Image (tube, rainbow, N blue to C red):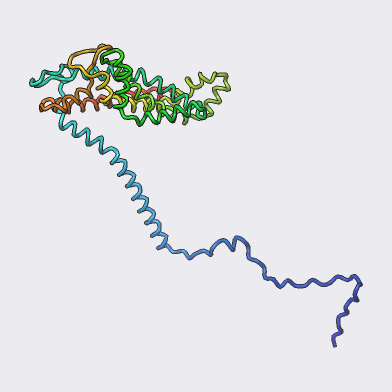
């Protein structure tokens, strides 16, 4: 017979035996959050990979198609100009003067030279101002003056060219009483300034801040750092922006109608009206003569080729300079 367990009297100080915990233990947190692994299914995995490859191929194809479509307008325009005006582009087209009405042949030597003069004048006026303004906008980004200049540059970028031509006529042609190549060059340069300024600002902002800090730590003044370090580092992008602006003004007609006006004779004087390819193309295109229409197509082809040659020379020069710097 089993003897009963003796119970300690109350207040005796003996410890009570631990009571068992009836609450079930919680599973680990990782076990609650991680789903149970699915069974390995090679067929489903292969189907998923094929679907991903198909979607990737479709997206790459769409991007490539977009790139091709972006170049189609230029290819169509260039092909049409070659088909319509290629037959009129001969050596005499570059060396002869325009023929009188009713006489076949002739060329646009005066218009080609006039276009080069006007583009050079516009670049000499617009590029230094635009690059300087863009450098200021980038180096003093939070200044009040920089914000005002940035806003006005954006407004000028969207200004119609004919409005610029009217203002140039009011302030450059009317006071002196006659049209001139100088007025045309200033009008084209004024159109370049906002585009070059905004492009320069965006390119300069990509220059690492560490280059500025290193130059300043070596004792360079801030203006010297901006001109010799920042501007030189961003020169490739600035050249590209300058080429875009030159390509834009090279084909402008409206500002030249109010400033340079055009000239059927040979003239290189900056104080006199001067011929230009856009003006000559416009005059020949609205004429009723078939020979002049062919000359207009040839002039448009030469204008595009002129912009292409300038771009290629600038790209080659920039690439050679940076290749020598890296060596």
Q: Is residue 247 visible?
A: no
Position of the N terminus by quadrant:
bottom right
Residue 88 position (above or below residue 263): below
> Relative to the observer, which residue lies in front, 276 or 49?
276
Horizontal arrangement in the rendering, residue 57 relative to residue 75 (left or right): right
The location of residue 316, given as percent across then percent down, is 34, 24
* Residue 220 in picture, x, y percent from top left: 55, 19
Residue 263 seen in render: yes
Q: Nearer the viewer, residue 27 or 311?
A: 311
Residue 265, x across and y down, in percent: 18, 14
Residue 322 % position (x, y) = 41, 24
Decide which of 148, 281 is in the foreground and name it: 148
In the rendered image of this protein, does residue 106 appear above or below residue 75?
above
Q: Is residue 16 left or right of residue 82?
A: right
Q: Residue at x 42, y 27 (%)?
A: 200
Count of marks placed on residues: 0
Residue at left 51%, top 28%? Answer: 144
| Image quadrant in which you'd find residue 274 | top left
Q: In what quadrant of the picture does the C terminus appear? A: top left
**Residue lying farthest to the bottom in this orientation:** 1
């Amino acid at each position: 017979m089993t003897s009963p367990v003796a119970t300690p009297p109350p207040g005796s100080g003996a410890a009570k035996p631990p009571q068992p915990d009836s609450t079930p233990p919680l599973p680990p947190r990782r076990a609650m959050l991680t789903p149970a692994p699915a069974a390995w299914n090679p067929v489903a995995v292969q189907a998923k990979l094929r679907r991903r490859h198909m979607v990737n191929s479709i997206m790459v194809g769409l991007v490539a198609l977009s790139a091709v479509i972006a170049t189609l307008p230029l290819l169509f325009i260039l092909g049409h100009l070659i088909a319509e005006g290629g037959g009129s582009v001969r050596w005499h087209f570059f060396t002869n003067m325009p023929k009188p009405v009713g006489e076949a042949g002739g060329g646009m030597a005066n218009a080609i030279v006039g276009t080069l003069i006007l583009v050079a004048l516009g670049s000499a006026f617009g590029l230094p101002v635009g690059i300087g303004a863009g450098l200021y906008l980038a180096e003093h980004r939070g200044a009040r003056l920089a914000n005002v200049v940035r806003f006005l540059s954006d407004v000028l970028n969207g200004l119609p060219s004919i409005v610029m031509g009217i203002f140039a006529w009011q302030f450059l042609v009317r006071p002196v009483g006659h049209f001139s190549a100088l007025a045309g060059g200033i009008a084209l340069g004024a159109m370049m300034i906002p585009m070059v300024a905004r492009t320069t600002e965006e390119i300069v902002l990509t220059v690492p801040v560490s280059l500025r800090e290193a130059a300043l730590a070596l004792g360079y003044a801030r203006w010297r750092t901006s001109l010799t370090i920042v501007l030189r580092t961003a020169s490739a992008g600035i050249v590209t922006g300058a080429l875009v602006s030159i390509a834009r003004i090279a084909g402008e007609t409206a500002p030249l109608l109010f400033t340079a006006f055009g000239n059927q004779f040979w003239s290189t004087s900056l104080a006199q009206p001067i011929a230009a390819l856009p003006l000559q193309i416009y005059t020949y295109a609205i004429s009723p003569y078939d020979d002049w229409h062919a000359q207009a197509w040839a002039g448009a082809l030469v204008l595009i080729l002129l912009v292409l040659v300038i771009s290629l020379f600038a790209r080659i020069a920039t690439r050679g300079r940076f290749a020598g710097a890296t060596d």
